[in-house]
Image (cartoon, rainbow, N blue to C red):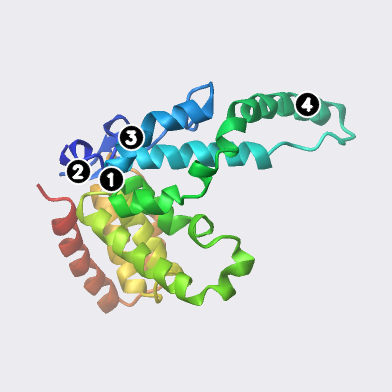
């Protein structure tokens, strides 16, 4: 697909949906075993040329290492089985940290916000992650109140990124936009839009998965509001997913 050719999405993780729509699903392991710095360096040149996929891979590699640094379980557990499991987990984290030590200590990698850069470069996955995980952009949640302008910027960019990704065919973005307009955190709550994006998602995803969430959203709306959502959803589907 064109997005893969442009370096905006990795075709290995793309699952075709209806029309020209698609979803993205990665395996839970973000990088192969081995030195994390060497792995990240392998993407650096392409990232500097503007390849969004490469930039996102660097972000995932650094995140994987940071999670390893923060995620080791406690060993002072009384239950023998839990303690044995924790000790096994600690060995796993020791290996990960040994692989990550050089990357976590490299100032040139850790001084740049790779998620923000990947989103700016147009990575579909990065733009989804940008909207879902504000901590990667804004820092710890306790400091949000000290960054009101940055919070506003994050909200505006999140909506822009999700809308752009949905127009390019991302059903992950359709689902997230439904969430956004339901919760009212990133954008003002709009139950009609929330339902419209959910309808679009349900009509473009592959297979015959349950549309239970759509039914739940419909219950909170009048028949007239549901009709409006149905009409809006048709335009969304035409924009995002029709060949």
What residue do we see at 35% from left, 43% from top? 209
What residue do we see at 67% from left, 42% from top? 70
Q: State left or right for residue 19 relative to residue 203.
A: left
Q: Considering only vertical position in the picture, is 117 above or below 186?
A: above
What residue do we see at 60% from left, 64% from top? 141
Viewer can see residue 208: no
Viewer can see residue 193: yes
Mark 4 or mark 2: name the one nearer the start of the chain: 2
According to the picture, the residue beneath numbered tag 2 turns out to be 18
Residues under numbered marks 1 and 4 in contact, where contact means CB atoms less than 8 Å apart: no
Q: Secondary structure at mark 2?
A: loop
According to the picture, the residue beneath numbered tag 1 turns out to be 205
Relative to the observer, which residue lies in front, 183 or 146? Answer: 146
According to the picture, the residue beneath numbered tag 4 turns out to be 87
According to the picture, the residue beneath numbered tag 3 turns out to be 45
Q: Considering only vertical position in the picture, is 221 above or below 161?
A: below
Q: State left or right for residue 179 relative to residue 124.
A: right
Residues under numbered marks 3 and 4 in contact, where contact means CB atoms less than 8 Å apart: no
Q: State left or right for residue 201 relative to residue 58.
A: left
Give residue 80's position: percent from left, percent from top: 87, 27
Relative to the observer, which residue lies in front, 232 or 32? Answer: 32
Residues under numbered marks 1 and 2 in contact, where contact means CB atoms less than 8 Å apart: yes
Mark 3 or mark 4: name the one nearer the start of the chain: 3
Q: State left or right for residue 89 relative to residue 1.
A: right
| Mark 3–mark 4 distance (CA, rounded to whole Å) | 39 Å
> Which numbered mark, 3 or 2, is in the foreground of this view?
3
| Mark 1–mark 4 distance (CA, rounded to whole Å) | 41 Å
């Amino acid at each position: 697909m064109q997005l893969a050719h442009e370096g905006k999405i990795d075709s290995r993780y793309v699952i075709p949906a209806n029309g020209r729509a698609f979803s993205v699903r990665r395996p839970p392991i973000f990088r192969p075993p081995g030195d994390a710095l060497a792995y990240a360096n392998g993407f650096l040149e392409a990232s500097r040329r503007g390849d969004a996929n490469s930039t996102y891979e660097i972000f995932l590699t650094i995140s994987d290492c940071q999670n390893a640094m923060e995620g080791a379980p406690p060993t002072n557990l009384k239950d023998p089985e839990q303690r044995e499991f924790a000790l096994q987990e600690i060995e796993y984290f020791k290996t990960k940290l040994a692989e990550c030590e050089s990357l976590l200590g490299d100032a040139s990698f850790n001084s740049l916000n790779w998620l923000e850069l990947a989103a700016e470069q147009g990575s579909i996955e990065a733009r989804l992650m940008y909207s879902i995980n504000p901590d990667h952009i804004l820092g710890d949640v306790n400091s949000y109140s000290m960054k009101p302008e940055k919070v506003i910027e994050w909200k505006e960019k999140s909506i822009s990124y999700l809308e752009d990704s949905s127009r390019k065919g991302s059903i992950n973005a359709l689902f997230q936009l439904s969430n956004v307009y339901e919760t009212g955190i990133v954008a003002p709550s709009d139950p009609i839009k929330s339902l419209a994006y959910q309808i679009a998602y349900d009509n473009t995803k592959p297979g015959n998965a349950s549309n239970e969430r759509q039914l739940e959203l419909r219950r909170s709306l009048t028949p007239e509001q549901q009709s409006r959502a149905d009409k809006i959803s048709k335009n969304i589907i035409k924009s995002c997913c029709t060949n």
